[in-house]
Image (spheres, rainbow, N blue to C red):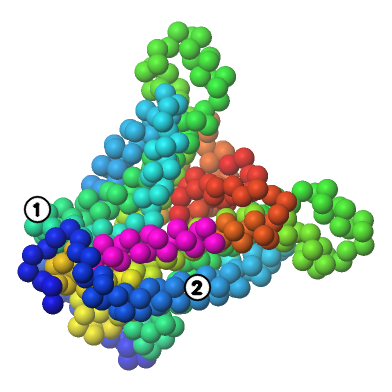
Amino acid sequence: MLIGTNPFFRWSYVTDNWSQIQADLVQHIELSVIAVAIGTAISIPLAVLAWRYRLVRAPVFGIASTLYIIPSLALFAILGPITGFVASYPTAEIALVGYTLLIMIWNTVAGLDAVPEDARDAATGLGYTPTAALIRVDLPLALPFIFAGLRVATATVIGLVTVTALIGLGGLGQQITYGFNIGYNTPIIVGLVLSIALAAVADLLLVGAQRLAVPWSRTRRPREVAGV
Amino acid sequence: MSFFAHVFGWFTTSSNWWGPQGILLLFWHQLTLSAVVVVGAVVLGGGLGLFLGHTGRGGLVAVNAANAFRAVPTLALLTLLAIQPAISLKWNGFLAAWIALTALAIPPILTNTYVGMREVDADVRDAAKGMGLTGGQSLRTVEAPLAVPFVMAGVRTASIEVVATSTLAAYVSYTDLGTFVISGLNENNSVLAFSGALLVAAMAGLVALVLTVLTRVLTPRPLRRRRAVRANDLALPQPVGGTQPL
């Protein structure tokens, strides 16, 4: 082991432990991708329902915002006994998905609300059924908002995955808890820098995907006025 | 069912409420840590936001820097600070937690204050000038009050995040409600972890509620109606992207 002196950063730690770091990075990506994918798959139909039917809106937002304000560590500990396993993918994923819901639903509903009335009239005039209009007109026009939500949700999830280290998963969070347990800076910095880098790369990929999916609108920086 | 019976038993045991490791004291610890962090962040982030928003210079750079800082995982910052000999576990981990949480709290407050100041109508600014107000007077009596709804949105977001994340401070030996969760997880005591988690969740909900009320009280009366439209969001991220003016 390399304990003893504690320099700010020691490269040899990275080269010596590369396979472990790589495994943690892969787990981090897995946990994040699964959470964002499932979260999006659940959020978009819920958002459509909340947008179409006023009655659905209040309960959907109520449940999503309740989940959102429960601190992540608490949610892991609450879900542990319910799913039956504390250190498990289901426990981590249910919580992580929970955090994406509010962000994704909020942005998708805002995007659908912002579809110009003219576009909807034109769709009706062309003889689109409401469902066809939803799929071919409303949702595509809401895509800039949906992508903005995806970017915020992805950044949030990548940050939260580190906390799952406290329930025995963690991806790069494992580097952080390991460094803390042995009182050594380098693993913590590795975890910190790689998770920031991961968030940056994921954001770039999403911007790229948006360019391809929404060629008619230039990407705008997400505005986080009230923050996430 | 016996699991929940145990949880119920834990909550109804009076020794879990009183004493040096009791719920009430640990609740107080979490509340004081969070309050100190948020007040400090309001002074630093809010002050800087007011100044940058008033002068209109250098603001975007500061806002972007603050937002980039958000990507830093707090667990990493917290543990990194906690193992530095100069900080280590000073004041039972309070110092490390204070610094790490302040770094978390400043970005939303700074960003919202700056945006709130820039959203003040240019005509209003001109009118204040035309009435002979100095820059400082205009800032204090005209611009800052108009920015309050935005500032409070930032304070609310920051407070909710800080209270939630102060749970993690228990990992670096500060004792607050997170201590129940962390020790429960470490000792494989799911009753303790679960009960602590319920307390933490309840506290987060309470803080969200109190801040929603506080926002309303602090908002100048004529601005309240506009706020009320958005009052149903507790910790909601504003819709982002697209062409929405705000």
Q: Position of residue A215 (x, y in %)?
A: 71, 54
- Pick whichever, A6 or B55, lies toward us: A6
**Does residue A190 sit above or below B107 in this rendering?**
below
Judged left or right of residue B120, residue A14 is left
Q: Secondary structure at mark 2?
A: helix
Residue placed under numbered mark 2 in the picture? A33
Q: Secondary structure at mark 1?
A: loop
Quadrant position of residue B42: top left
Q: Position of residue B138 (x, y in %)?
A: 42, 18
Q: Is residue A9 visible?
A: yes
Q: Chain of mark 1?
A: B
Q: Mark 2 is on which residue type?
A: Val
**Does residue B148 sit above or below A70 in this rendering?**
above
Q: Which mark is residue B86?
A: 1
Magenta stretch, main secondary structure, is: helix
Residue depicted at x 53% and y 15%: B126
Q: Position of residue B131 (x, y in %)?
A: 49, 9
Residue depicted at x 30% and y 59%: B74
Q: Mark 1 is on which residue type?
A: Ala
Badge 2: residue crowd in 10 Å (few <14, some 14–19, many ≥20) = some
- Pick whichever, B10 or A160, lies toward us: A160
- Pick whichever, A18 or B101, lies toward us: A18
Give the magenta-colored segment's residue range: A187-205
Residue depicted at x 65% and y 48%: A218
Q: Is residue B211 visible?
A: no
The tally of labels here is: 2
